[in-house]
Amino acid sequence: MLRLVLPVLATIGDTIRAFTQAAAQFFDDLSTLHWGSLAISLALFGAYLVIRSRASFNALRAAYPNERFQWRRIWGAYVAAYGLNGVVPAGSGSIVQVVLSRNSIPNSSYPAVTSALSVGAIFDGLMYAAIIAYAFTQGVFPKPSDFGSLSSFDIAFFGRHPQLTIFIVTAVAELGILAFALLSRRVRAFWRHIREGLAILTQPRRYLTGMVVPQFAGWVLRGASYWYLLEAFHLPPTVRGAILVLAAQGIASLVPFTPGGVGAQQALLIVIFSSTAATDSVAVFSVGQQIAVTAFTLALGFAALVVIFRYRSFRHVIRESRRQRAEAKAEPGPDDGVPGSPTERARV
């Protein structure tokens, strides 16, 4: 047991040390940044968030064609979750998106809203697969067999124990399916809500125009954003480089044990750009771009919470999310989560 734990603890220490050193260097070098490129990058990233939220809105509108709800609330829920995911591990901020989206749609349910918001994962999965496949053909991206030698504890651990990784992924998926089935008080109603949330998939033309097109446009905007981020941090700005950054983020998202997968991203990017830039410069970029994007999305998310949803902090919305989910499990009702209902009025 110690032979398994001690190397992991040592790698965790190396990951934290590498991150703090790169972060310190980033703040020391703020004056050398190309601020114009950084501003353009964040503007493009903001446009990416807008168009992505529109795809989510279209999926929810297909699930609830007879309900009226505002796009700005779906956008607010999305940016609040995105900002929170940058500072909490395991994508926990997505729970906030589900709760805020549900509260924005009259007569909605958690299963339907969750499944509708998950529809985007289909096209995203295909895009990530294509991007990662491209990255592996470039001769600079580490092979899965080399992940165990990377300096990030999360990706290195799973790289050294591939069989355990497969077991954990399979077990989590099976437990999730089992929990959904067993914890639902009315199984038939539960699966009806799931099908309701996936309604847009039964309308191919609507799915293509309402989700695939805006999602693809979002990917283009996101890639362009990272092109300018590379320029802002004095790394060669190329389409290939931006795609490799997206590939590193895709791999990092599979092991989200650090906020935003920052440890895995840093380890991968250092290897990817080792032949074109100094290691210190790449380390500063890997951490600096994460700090810039996280600060930007946190600011947007907080503004959405205050202006749109009337919450005073992320802590309040997380606490309220837990309370509402507990109430929904204990006593589901027809007005549960509807703006103006007792659940909605009980906010802090």
Image (tube, grey):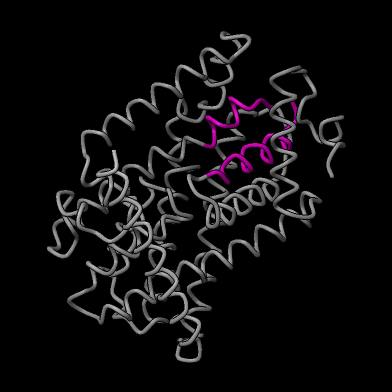
Q: Residue 78 at what x, y percent from top left?
A: 60, 49
177 with respect to 266 (left or right): right
Principal secondary structure, stretch drawn in magenta = helix
Residue 192 vertical position relative to residue 115 in the rendered view, above or below: above
**Camera-nearest residue between 167 and 229:** 167
For this rendering, which residue is in front, 254 or 193? Answer: 254
Q: Which quadrant holds the C terminus?
A: top right
Q: Residue at x 60, y 31 (%)?
A: 113
Vertical placement of residue 36 versus 191, above or below? below
Up/down of 230 relative to 16, above or below? below
192 above or below 249? above
Q: Is residue 254 left or right of residue 279?
A: right
Please tell me in which quadrant of the rendered image residue 248 appears.
bottom left
Find the residue positioned furthest to the bottom: 31
- Expressed as whole percent of the image width and height from the top left, the position of residue 13 reads 38, 61
Q: How many marks?
A: 0
Where, quadrant-wise, is the N terminus in this rendering?
Answer: top left
In the rendered image, residue 325, in percent from the top left (x then y), is placed at: 69, 29
Q: Is residue 253 magenta?
A: no
Residue at 67% across, 37% down: 99
Extreme-front residue of the structure: 2
| Residue in view at x 17 percent, y 76 percent | 275
Magenta part of the chain: 92-117
Would you identify the image quadrant in which residue 69 lies? top right
Tell me what residue is drawn at x 36 percent, y 25 percent.
171
Give the percent coordinates (x, y) of residue 331: 76, 17
